[in-house]
Amino acid sequence: MPELKCPVCGEVLRPAEKTLQCVRGHSYDRARQGYVNLLMSNAASAKRHGDDRQMVLARQAFLEKGYYGCLRDALCAAALQHTSGSVELLDAGCGEGWYTCAVRDALTQAGRACHACGVDISREALKCAARRDRTLTLAVSSVSALPVRDGSCDLVLSVFAPTHDAEFRRVLRPGGILLRAVPLEEHLWGLKAAVYDRPYRNPAPRGETEGFRLLDRREIRDRLTLTDPEEIRQLFQMTPYYYKTGRADQAKLLALDRLETELAFCVFALERV
């Protein structure tokens, strides 16, 4: 599987009792919830805690209902198309592991061995990922300093997550694949129009990435109709919009009993050169 490395000295981490240890004696406890914390306490990213419990639980409940199944299926198809043989998979910003497990399962069901590792800065997200599948290797860390050995990955997923192209290139072997999913300009336009007086479009995604060759760009569009106020709340709370919106505008959406909105995603497949 993708080899975890010590964030202090960079040596490979090996299991030892309830810890991970490197040859230089640095040791990291494995939490009972199923993850290891490899985020350096003095790192700038340590000031961030990632998605909180409310956001994680809302996203988990919403995704489990299959509303983003079109994106999940596109990622699985791209992974099957652009990789071969056994696959060492790293999900950089894995959240609660829904896409991680979907891609891993698609590969294994196609007869391909796949070992999956997920990294996220949110402990709450990793707790959910561990409950989803105890076989996942999970580590608390920032994507800007991945605790993964150079060239130990065949496939890196980045789904609506912060990106760090230099780190992605470092952990991928030559010829390895980066699958990046981003929102298109009109994604969740109906939700924004219900909340904001002046809704805005997302920036146009760019596929050019230094150190990578663009292999494929897939646009996925669908339309979503929600008639359950709880599902509307879950969709809103799983997005960054909820925390950037004042109480008056939050109340507009939370008062709805029906929401129609666009889903619009782009999946880039990029080869590490």
Image (cartoon, rainbow, N blue to C red):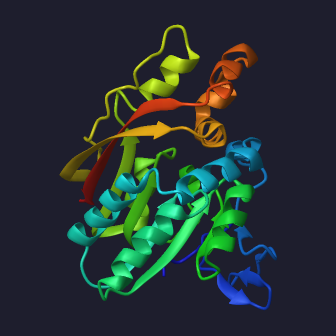
Q: Identify which residue, 169 or 256, lies in the foreground.
A: 256
Give the percent coordinates (x, y) of residue 232: 60, 37
Q: Is residue 270 above or below residue 259?
A: below
Q: Which of 230/237 is in front?
A: 230
State the image coordinates of residue 40 (x, y, percent, origin top left).
73, 56
* Residue displayed at 29% across by 35% down: 206
Q: Is residue 170 visible?
A: yes
Horizontal arrangement in the rendering, residue 54 relative to residue 232 (left or right): right
- Residue positioned 23% across, 48% down in the render: 218
Count of labels in the image:
0
Instruction: Specify whether 245 is left or right of 82.
Output: right
Residue at the top extreme, as displayed: 197
- When asked about the image quadrant of residue 171, the answer is bottom left
Q: Residue 168: x, y in percent? A: 42, 57
Query: Which one is in front, 155 or 261?
Result: 261
Q: Is residue 93 visible?
A: no
Name the residue rendered at 62%, 26% in the picture: 256
Up-down relation of residue 255 to residue 230 (above or below): above
Tell me if residue 101 comes above or below residue 114 in the rendering.
above
| Residue 235 relative to residue 77: left or right | right
State whether residue 160 is above or below residue 89: above
Image coordinates for residue 93, horizontal then vertical, percent: 55, 55
**Residue furthest to the left:** 215
- Give the quarter of the figure containing the C terminus: bottom left
Going by the image, does 252 lie left or right of 31? left
